[in-house]
Amino acid sequence: MRLSTSDTIAAIATAPGRGGIGIVRVSGPSLGPFIYALLGRSLEPRHASYGPFPDAEGTAIDQGIAIFFSAPNSYTGEDVLELQGHGGPAVMQALLKRCLSAGADFGLRMAAPGEFTLRAFLNDKIDLAQAEAVADLIDASSEAAARAAMASYQGAFSKKIDLLTSQIVELRTLVEATLDFPEEEIEFLEKFQARSRLARIQKELSDVLTQSQQGMVLREGLHVVLAGEPNVGKSSLLNALAGQDLAIVTDIAGTTRDKVSEVIYLDGVPITIIDTAGLRHTDDTIETLGIARSWDEIKRADVVLHLLDVKQPNSPLDKEISSCRAASSTMLQVFNKCDLLDTASRRALNNDRDALFISAKTGDGLQTLRTRLLEIAGWQPSQESPWLARQRHIDALVAAQVSLCQAQAHAEQNDRVLDLFAEELRLAHDQLGSITGRMTPDELLGEIFSRFCIGK
């Protein structure tokens, strides 16, 4: 993403559609002359000004509140103007069009996706992890995820990374200074307690990684596919987990011909449950298409719940389902309709710990299934993440962890390997820096901010 930060940018900052209030946002250097050209009046910083928003001929497009935030005390760190009017699409588009025409002589253009937040990052209002938290807060699908995203935006995650970074920098400083005196390399490890310092950093990094993995689970959740032959209870299980009748349930084989999906929340963790067409060989063209989609969903799943009728186990398709799933996915055998068994048979089944036994009809075993799904996701209900995290954060933390382990190995050799020790510390430092944006290539910035909505 190579965009000029000297331009003035504008966009509709509220979601598409109708609403009571809509906002057009403008950001750039020295907006005073533009504001006067647009509104015919000057604005006092950080004071709401109620009045008309006129077109080029002076006729009111709308009437609302204009607020001017002078640099650097604004979201982007630049001068920012917000026009808060009525949230109809026609009104918002007319206001945006008027801003673009009035700003033609001031170098104003439409903002790119995420460009307001990108400018906030470039102007040191927020770091990269906080910038990502803005998008995560907007996209949060549960209260727990929203709380964690807000914690990230307020800097909880960044502070942990900065603390780790400062400790590594302190150790790096001592190492780099000692490299100028080769005869003191071995003494350095003892004199400055390098090994114990490194051990403390490794412990703290491990704790941050654990918390971040919890945060990623809260953000990403699980993609769970219900698979099996017709009439094993897939649709009934979907309805039971969702708590409502989403899928049609009948005794007729092949009722479900296309996937039906629903997002449920277990301890705030989003679980996407997908009911698929029953797997069998059929000459029905429509059902065949549905079955093909079922196989595709199985290949993409994080977890495959392979449902079997407890009265008719060992389906010929069992091995085919197991071989079809992705190597990275988890497969659980779930025997349904256990309510049809007598007490003795149920006790015998309960001894089989490699499978789950449930009744979608009565609810027996569903809580165990929910708990197992959370375990697979890596979620520990008693350890709610204080921040939201992304896969790139996890990758960077793991890479830093590997570098610190290599540094530890070099430190234990005691054979003039201080230069290697220092190099591994540098690599760990770089990885942590990539999380907050202290050391981030332009390509990564483009990838991150291009996923934002326009106006944010």
Image (cartoon, rainbow, N blue to C red):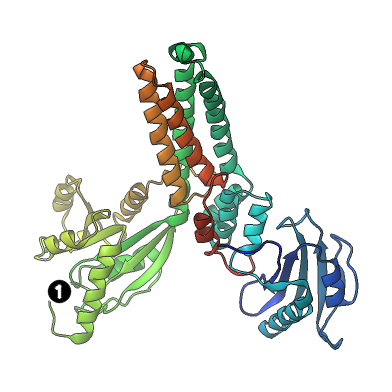
Residue 293 shows up from this direction: yes
Q: Amino acid at mark 1?
A: Arg
Residue 399 percent location from the top left of the image: 41, 40
Residue 165 percent location from the top left of the image: 55, 34
* Quarter-of-image position of residue 177: top right
- The image shows residue 280, relative to residue 442, as above or below, that is below
Task: Name the foreground residue: 98 vs 384.
Answer: 98
- The image shows residue 133, relative to residue 210, as above or below, that is below
Residue 70 percent location from the top left of the image: 82, 58
Q: Secondary structure at mark 1?
A: loop
In the picture, measured across the screen, residue 245 lies left or right of residue 14, that is left
Q: How many marks?
A: 1
In the picture, measured across the screen, residue 308 lies left or right of residue 90, that is left
Residue 187 percent location from the top left of the image: 46, 11
* Quarter-of-image position of residue 199: top left
- The image shows residue 150, relative to residue 420, as above or below, that is below
Judging by the rendered image, the residue that carries numbered circle 1 is: 280
Which image quarter holds the N terminus?
A: bottom right
Which image quarter holds the C terminus?
A: bottom right
Residue 141 shows up from this direction: no
Give the residue displayed 35% in from the left and 61% down from the top.
223
Give the residue displayed 69% in from the left and 52% down from the top.
123
Task: Name the foreground residue: 428 vs 370.
Answer: 428
* Quarter-of-image position of residue 249: bottom left
- The image shows residue 70, relative to residue 215, as above or below, that is below
In the picture, measured across the screen, residue 189 lies left or right of residue 310, that is right
Task: Name the foreground residue: 205 vs 143.
Answer: 205
Mark 1 residue crowding within 10 angstroms, few (<14) / some (14–19) / many (20+): some
Give the residue displayed 44% in from the left and 19% down from the top.
195
